[in-house]
Amino acid sequence: MLAYLIVAILTTILHFFRKGQEGVLLDGYLSTLASIVATLVVTTFSFVFVALQLASVQFSPRIIRSFFEYDHFSRFFLWSFLACVGYLMGLQYFGLSDASLIYPKFGIVGSFYLILLVFPLFIHHVVDNINASSITQNIAKRTIKEINELYDVADFQSSKSNKLLIVIKESGYLDSIRYKSLYQIIPENSQSKISVKPHVGSFVLEGMPLVEIECSESERDFYQQNLSKIANQFIISKFRSYEQDIPFGIRQLVDIAIKAISPAVNDPTTALNCIDYLGNIIKKAASSNTISKEATLLQQKNIHIREFNFEQLVDLAFDQIYHWGKEDYIIVRHLIKTITNILPFINDPDKLFLLLAEVEDMELSFLKENYEELAKKEENICPFKRAEHRNSLRDYLVDYYEAAIIQIDKIGLSDEKLKAIKKSYERNRAFVLRHRE
């Protein structure tokens, strides 16, 4: 109704300031507008139906019904455009296209309103609504609504505590934190301790504690008065975003890589490309401080936020790709190569140990043994039956051992764990070279 009211007001203003010449017919102008509006409807919905068909194949065919049944804006878009075409054609048929009349002005203003405002909004709406996160959120919201209508739902009772809690009011992803604004809200002389419970990028449930505040009685009134203001600095969204959420970019590359190496897609080149860029991200993370600049700033006022550490980033980047691609020697080889390329940039013993552990967790012990002897055993754990594949892996593994030994000599001689790994790698390198086929 608001849209129609806006069109009516604009039309009235136009008619008042621009009366129009009597006897001048606007048939050609109205026909052009009608053809433009009709073309937009046909073209747009052709693309929408193709997108919905792809979404139904990827997700579920049952999601198509919800696109129109529960989507009021899509219905408004379709019927408004069709009504506009019918109105423009009706003006010409009934001879109401004279420039001095107000009727054609309704059609002109309405057409421009739909073309310049409603159409871009609809495109944004469709792109947003066929996203996987939007689909899953809408399904969950409708289901939760039915639960609330059908059943008596008990209110969540949090355990009693002297700490002040900011509770999440709507489920979603913790998209970002307004660090500077949060820093400015907390007084300089505050003795309180503020702990942010979830990571940025975490999915949070309605009713979960978002922030926990330990404060003295003298400061309690201040925080109680500013709880809502503090809560507003945490952005909850239905999507994860790149802002402040480093694992999200890694997650997307891993998803692409896993899908690329699946039998349905079978595109290992894309998977290798993803591994290359994952290596670049991990290399950058390895040379960065483990605590972000924002977290360092907030710690000055005893505000503690949770962040992903280097170990979690490495595991997220490589573990799943290896799990799904461990029977493809090209994927395994490229993972070893990527980690080998990162090693020279690691100057922290702890980070070096974590990266070396990633290769150690790979099931590559069969490369240190003779394949014929291994085949005689009751359980053959070697997934690669061709000697050239095994030898190719051995070559890359030798390069990895040499790079690791060099880097341990460079930075880790004082670390007992790394010294033990160096001795093990020297033996392993000799074993691998000895068992080339």
Image (cartoon, helix red, strand yellow):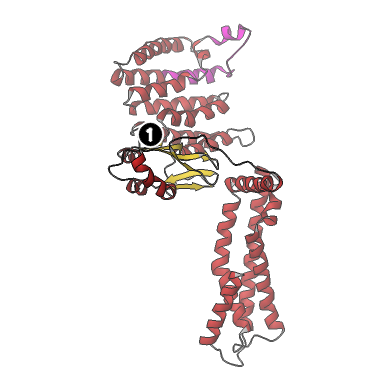
The N terminus: image quadrant: bottom right
Which of the 4 image quadrants contains residue 417? top left
Secondary structure predominantly adopted by residues drawn in magenta: helix
Q: Which residue is mark 1?
A: 285
Q: Which residue is drawn at the image coordinates 45% and 24% (left, top)?
A: 336
Which of the two residues, 410 or 14, is positioned nearer the viewer here?
A: 14
Q: Which one is nearer the viewer's eye here, 200 or 368? A: 200
Residue 310 or 280: which is nearer the viewer?
A: 310
Name, please, the residue furthest toward the bottom.
22
Residue 374 included in the magenta stretch of the image:
yes
Query: Can residue 177 be seen at all in this image of the molecule?
Result: yes
Residue 208 position within the rendered picture, expressed as x and y whole percent measured from the top left: 52, 39
Residue 209 in the figure: left or right of residue 304: right
Residue 127 at what x, y percent from top left? 57, 54
State whether residue 294 appears in this view: no
Above or below: residue 5 compared with residue 293: below
Q: Residue 131's spot in the image, x, y percent?
A: 58, 48
Q: Amino acid at mark 1?
A: Ala
Residue numbers of the magenta segment: 370-399
Q: Position of residue 348 (x, y in %)?
A: 32, 25
Identify the image quadrant of residue 429.
top left
Dot 1: element: helix
Answer left or right for 312 relative to 92. Answer: left
* Residue 376 in which image quadrant: top right
Within the magenta stretch, is there residue 136?
no
The answer to whether 328 appears left or right of 397 in the picture is: right
In the figure, 41 relative to 274: above or below? Answer: below
Count neighbours of disc 1 (C-alpha within 10 A) and say few if under 14, some if 14 to 19, many if 20 or more: some
Tally of marks: 1
The residue at the point 30 percent across, 39 percent down is: 300
Tell me if residue 376 comes above or below residue 409 in the rendering.
above
